[in-house]
Amino acid sequence: MQRLARYASGVKRRLISAAFVACALSACTASSAPNEPLASPTTITPWPSDAATTTQPAVTFTLVSAGDVLPHTSLFQAAKTADGYDFTPNMAASKPFVEGADIALCSLEVPIAPEGTKPSGYPMFGAPKQLIGDLKTLGWDGCTFATNHTADRGWDGLKTTLDAFDAAGLGVTGVGRTNDERLAPRYYRVEKDGRSFTLAHVSGTYGLNGMPDPGKKQGFQAVNMLEDIADAAKRAKDAGADIVIASPHWGIEYQMKPNDEQRAIGQQLADTGVVDAIIGTHPHVPQEVAELAGKDGKKVPIVYSTGNFWSGQDEKCCTRETATGLIAQLAITVDDDGARVGAMKYTPVTMDLDARRHHFMLSSLVDGDRPKGVTLKPDRIKARWDALLKVMGDEHLEKNPPKGGAKVTLVDAPKKG
């Protein structure tokens, strides 16, 4: 038996040697498949094929961001309860769009009234403290708070508001209790279906209605201005953020088109090469969705104004368009090559002030839906719809809520991969 084994082994060696010699004589090249069996009666296990390697599929996330949360006096009076305030019913109609997003970022226009003071409306706002927790309950993950009303309640108002964000577990950007906090972008880690990315949110405002910066007496700047946004975005990318969203508070109130300053600053942000999308606020009316050509041909989606998300404004006090605001929906795709933004769409919400200051989904009302409590008549709904389409068109219109389900975590610094 041992002689037979040695004989078989010798035959095998001679066959393999012969195969290599034959290959050399016939000028074999590197193009021969590495997993082809040698010309031998002996079975040889091939190398694993590259085709067997599995790649994690790309995942698309949806970010939503909306217009100004602007609680005029009539709004928080309508939300008053026996033991405080409850704002969730007033914005419940949009909850499927907010909760359905993978990450949701709002715009809080006003500060929270400090302890020992009463809530107030225009012109010096101070919202009830329950508003922040209710935004969390409605599905928001964070907000921008750099607006022209940030300084309405001074240092105490700013600190009270940021403390309330912290207590609710909501992110906030554009404002700080220290200079370092103001300068730091707000980072979110977003995870779903085996993919994840880090999003940075940065913001700034055109001014503070002539009020001094709330941090002035403390010896530092507490609120970002528009000129601070680009630097904040660069810091975020340098730190390793995958996606940077900029939320400038800019423009002219009640103007249906972006002005020259908005267009110029928007282009400057796109030209940095580090801003991935721009979602504007402040004019109280919707303004167009567009796409800017940025650095190296990078496409940067922009909505110049998302208008009012929830406010006390409509045709009776202001222009018709103040009653309607936008929820911007932005697609973010993550694959082996990294994260990138795609299309930006919008979904309109509209105020029904006679329905205890609730808002409703405008496209649903146009399609004939009559939610419980709505008081808006069909002709008024159609007039608002026609006015919206005149400004926005229907190319980017999205009537359906997203279906996300991502895990969102507030983080102090980006984490790649």
Image (cartoon, rainbow, N blue to C red):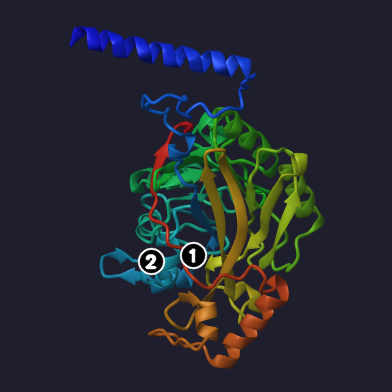
Q: Which mark is residue 312?
A: none
First reached walking from the N terminus: tag 1 or tag 2: 1
Residue 141 screen position, x and y as percent = 42, 51
Residue 356 against residue 59 in the figure, above or below: below
Residue drawn at the location 58% of the way across and 47% of the way down:
146
Residue closer to the observer: 74 or 175:
175
Classify mark 1: residues with Cα within 10 Å, few (<14), some (14-19) or many (20+).
many
The N terminus appears in which quarter of the rendering? top left
Q: Which amino acid is tagged 1?
A: Pro
Would you say residue 208 is visible in this rendering? no
Rounded to the nearest whole Å, what is the CA distance between mark 1 and mark 2?
10 Å
Residue closer to the observer: 52 or 243:
52
Residue closer to the observer: 251 or 83:
251
Would you say residue 355 is visible in this rendering? yes
Considering every residue shown, the one lying at the far left of the view is 1
Q: Pointer 1 and pointer 2: residues touching (CB < 8 Å)?
A: yes
Residue that numbered label 1 is attached to: 71
Residue drawn at the location 32% of the way across and 12% of the way down:
9
Residue drawn at the location 47% of the way across and 88% of the way down:
375
Residue that numbered label 2 is attached to: 87
